Image (cartoon, helix red, strand yellow):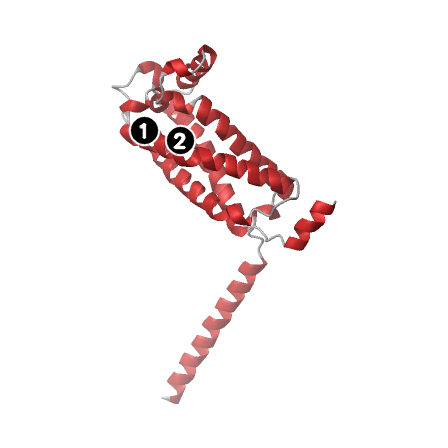
Amino acid sequence: MKISYQKRDCQASKSLKMRTVFVNVMMEVPARVEDYVPRSVLDKVFLGYYLFQIVSTIGLDMQGTLPAFIYPSWLRSLHSHHCETWHDPFLANTWKHPWYFSICMWEYFFHVPFYFVAAFAYYQRINGLDNLRWVRIPTIMYCTQTITATSGIMMMALMEDFSSYNSDHAPSGLFQRLQLAGIYGTFFTFCVFNVLDVLTEKDSSPQQVDNKKRE
């Protein structure tokens, strides 16, 4: 009986040592996005992303649901060119796709206001005026919702039967399907990096922010 207990204790100590070594190794491995990309570059990229979202959502995406007379002719032409070039049947006629329409409504009423808030927050941090702690939770909410929505759109682009769709606004082959999925995959990728950055970034102390202000 003593031998069996000793074996168990030995196995338990070995497993504990292995866990400790694994945890130490994981703690030593850099897991932050800013360990690979400079903080200043990340902030400028995310600022550019949210500014682009403001322009593209209001100028292009909303044309799928709002009356055409609201927009000037050159914006309507740009919208048509986008739908024909990238073979996007969902944006071409949003009302025919209720699932896509619901995603657009969520974007119009919740994402667009957040774009302005996020752009302001990143602008503030680029100028050393803020540490973005107050906007972390909204950013996580936005990114996770966008990742979920774009995942569904990409699967539709790759798996949907487009035989009954308008030929000008629907992908007709694998390459065009990949093109359409890639457009939405861009937003997916940005949000993945954004949420990882927010979850793993180092906290900026108030003293660091004050020092940046003085500089």
Q: Secondary structure at mark 2?
A: helix
- Residue 135's tag is none
* Mark 1 lies on residue: 101
The residue positioned 67% from the left and 52% from the top of the image is: 208
Q: Is residue 76 left or right of residue 27?
A: left
Q: Is residue 67 above or below residue 154?
A: above
Q: Nearer the viewer, residue 200 or 104?
A: 104
Earlier sequence position, callout 2 versus callout 1 = 1
Residue at the extreme top of the image, as rendered: 73
Give the x, y percent position of residue 51: 53, 30
Residue 186 showing in the rendered view: yes
Is 27 placed left or right of 57 in the picture?
Answer: right
Above or below for 139 versus 62 = below
Q: Element under label 1?
A: helix
**Where is mark 2, residue-wise?**
108
Instruction: Identify the residue at horizontal 53%, vertical 66% (top origin).
Output: 21
The three-letter amino acid code for the residue at tag 2 is Tyr
Residue 9 position, x and y percent, is 43, 80
- Picture quarter containing residue 174? top left
Q: Residue furthest bottom?
A: 2
Q: Is residue 169 left or right of residue 78?
A: left
Measured from the top left, where is residue 106 in percent x and y? 36, 35
Which amino acid type is marked by label 1?
Answer: Phe
